[in-house]
Image (cartoon, coloured by chain):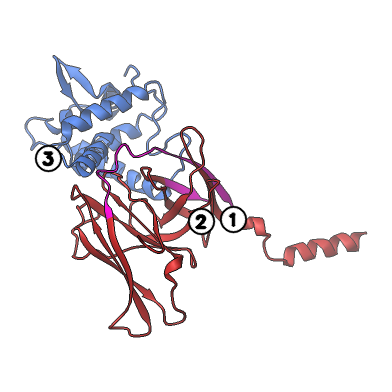
Amino acid sequence: MTLLQANAEAVQRHYGLSDPERAAFTITAYLTSRGIGVPVSPGIVAGQPVFEGRLRALAESVGRGERVYARRCERCHAPGTVAPTALRFPRAVNGQLESLERFLGRHPPDLPPLAWDGQPTADIIAFLHSRLAGRPIGGSP
Amino acid sequence: MLYVSLALWLIGWALPPAADAATVIAGLVRTESGRPLPGLALLEKGEIHNNRWDRGTLIDPSGRFRIELAEGGQYGLHVYASGYLYKPNAVKVETDKTLEVEVVLVPEPTRANDPVIKRVEFVPSEARRGKATLVRMEVSDPNGDLGPQVLAFNAATGRAFAMAPPRWVWSLKSNYPDGVYQLDVDTAKAPTDPRDWYFVVADHKCNTTDILSFPFR
């Protein structure tokens, strides 16, 4: 589950919004801005306990993500080149807000879209972030 | 001298672990301004919000609590104080070590959204006559967003329980119904004393009842 997806679930549960994406997006953008410059550390938060079960689930997600990436993305984009661009999200393009989840969901256009709140999307992002460990959040790709 | 040292080493080796080798979560609960808060600290065993309640304790007037655990691992620590939003916290306790935490609670901005405990009663079980007591608690929520945290705590045993809802609920994330929640307490070996019991309810938005204790009014 990505930060956006977790925020969406929390917003939906706590406030009963039928469409939680926009609220989740703004919360995610705010939280991401608070973390600018902090090194990416998938599954681990500084000062917080490390939960092995969560790390195992994340490793499984990374494995699935690598396979989904190979099917959907790798024919055009080497993961080493693409992964750093994940640090640019969430972003605003021509005044439109865009999450990495939405961006990935409609690429490539010749394949069925992925749901922004679905597991395959979370898996691709887990795979991309696994290649970014140590890079600063919000840093230049 | 060598023999004395050897004897001391053997004694130390043979003795059970010292008292400080217990697996413990302890902590201080306070307001943002530093005022200590009494209340309840309850633990879920495993992933937080799994609703598998385990141990608990009362938080004393100085805001201190201490829970000794059978084993280390991952726990969900939930802290409750009357008039404050409850606070969940995922923690990891190492075996034979003490985890110290500090919990800051924020006052509820309004009590209008709080769940309401209308009634608590202890009745002998008809099905398990003489062997069980049913604890029944009638709960309602002004916003209809009760969650699974309809909780009972037995201070005599240190056990915390989620009470069973009046009807089946699809998932822990669902809104739970108003009505009479129930807990089946095994009293085959010894009766239970209502004075040992404490109750608290929190909804999906963290609105929390006061902690209810005997005489449950």
Is B97 within the magenta?
yes
Q: Position of residue B79 (x, y in %)?
A: 42, 48
Identify the amino acid type marked 1. Answer: Asp
Is A127 within the magenta?
no
| Chain whose colour in the figure is red | B
Front residue of A87/B93: it is B93
Lateral position of residue B9 relative to residue B90, left or right: right
Quadrant of residue A109 in the image?
top left
SS at circle 3: loop
- In the picture shown, does residue B3 fall above or below A126? below
Pinpoint the chain carrying mark 3.
A
- In the picture shown, does residue B90 fall above or below A76? below
Q: Which mark is residue B96?
A: 1
Identify the amino acid type marked 2. Answer: Gly
Front residue of B214/A46: it is B214
Write the start and end of the magenta stretch as one range. Answer: B90-116
Circle 3 residue: A18
Q: Position of residue B81 (x, y in %)?
A: 42, 47
Q: Position of residue A37 (x, y in %)?
A: 40, 21
Q: Is residue B95 visible?
A: no
The Cα–Cα distance between marks 1 and 3, rounded to whole angstroms, is 46 Å
